[in-house]
Amino acid sequence: MRNLLIRSASAIIYGALLIIGCVFYTPVLYATLGLFAVFGIIELKNLSNIKISKNALTIWIALCLIDILSFILLIEANLLDINSLLLLISAICLQIFVISFFSNLVTNKILQFLSTSAIYIVFPLILMIFLQTNKTANNFSYLLILLILIWINDTFAYIIGSLVGKHKFCEKISPKKTWEGLLGGFIITLVAAIIINLYYFKFENTIVLTSVLIVCVSATLGDLFESKIKREAEVKDSGKLIPGHGGILDRIDSLLIAAPTFSFFILILKYF
């Protein structure tokens, strides 16, 4: 009971920070995503079991935060477009290339960690900012829509899987996942999305269905990917930062894969 209360309190604080940032005061979102980047990279480093100096790790985290800050400045200066987004992605790739050029200074394992942290953590966080700045006709940010869909899917996939789940899904990676939970989470998320769409957005049904499918599948893949990393590291949680939940990566694993895929879908809708 005590553990459930701790988990619930942590989830409420986490959700409140994101909702406040999405709806009321964007700097809260920026600060929260910055913290996600810092602790996420540290957790990934620990899971990777690599030896890297504190100075080197600090410099890398600082570079990643500069990338995120640069993207925010582009937004505040009203310079955000597809070209600036591609430019920033290129800058991140250039950082990795430069480090690779001096590969005699680091091991292949460190290079793999640097590349993975940029692609797996920093890039999705930047795209979350992109989703926040792009809004529907009635001023709903796409990031808030993504968060709502993920939370509904995760919650009901867990509940239904716990109640009636019998057929395991990817048992070697995530033993608690079941096909019943996945299907139940998807169906309830789809029904909720249709109802919300009727009252707020008026998107075409095909867009709603595609959005829910993309989010549910990619969120599940994000969960599985992080579970695989933890299994290879032989740990239960990515860290101990969040009481009752583990680490930051345990909390945002679904978002890290869902944000890029949902962003690409939004880009297709906007520009094609």
Image (tube, rainbow, N blue to C red):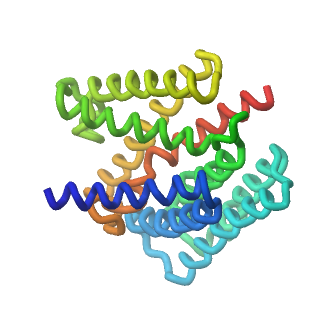
Image quadrant of residue 241?
bottom left
Q: Is residue 101 visible?
A: no
Residue at position x 76%, y 54% in the image? 90
Is 68 located above or below residue 226 in the figure?
Answer: below
Q: In this view, does 251 lie above or below 114?
A: above
Q: Judge from the rendering whether residue 76 lies leftward or rightward of residue 265; answer left or right.
A: right
In the orientation shown, which residue stands out farthest toward the bottom? 55
Can residue 65 be seen here? The reply is: yes
- Give the total of numbered labels: 0
Task: Tell me: residue 124, above or below residue 137.
Answer: below
Which of 79 and 238 lies nearest the eye of the viewer?
Answer: 79
Position in image of residue 105 (x %, y %): 60, 75
User: Most extreme residue toward the front, as rendered?
Assistant: 199
Task: State left or right for residue 94 relative to residue 221.
Answer: right
Residue at image position (46%, 23%) is 190
Side (left or right) of 157 relative to 60:
left
**Quarter of the image that includes the N terminus:** bottom left
Q: Where residue 28 sits: x, y (%)?
A: 58, 64
**Residue that lies at the very extreme toward the left in this rendered image:** 1
Foreground pick, 165 / 227: 165
Q: Quadrant of residue 125?
A: bottom right
Q: Residue at the location (54% across, 57% down)?
A: 20
Q: Which residue is at 30% across, 51% downward? A: 231
Residue 201 screen position, x and y as percent: 63, 28
Relative image position of residue 178 (x, y in whole percent):
26, 29
Q: In which quarter of the image is the C terminus?
A: top right
Quarter of image, res 79: bottom right
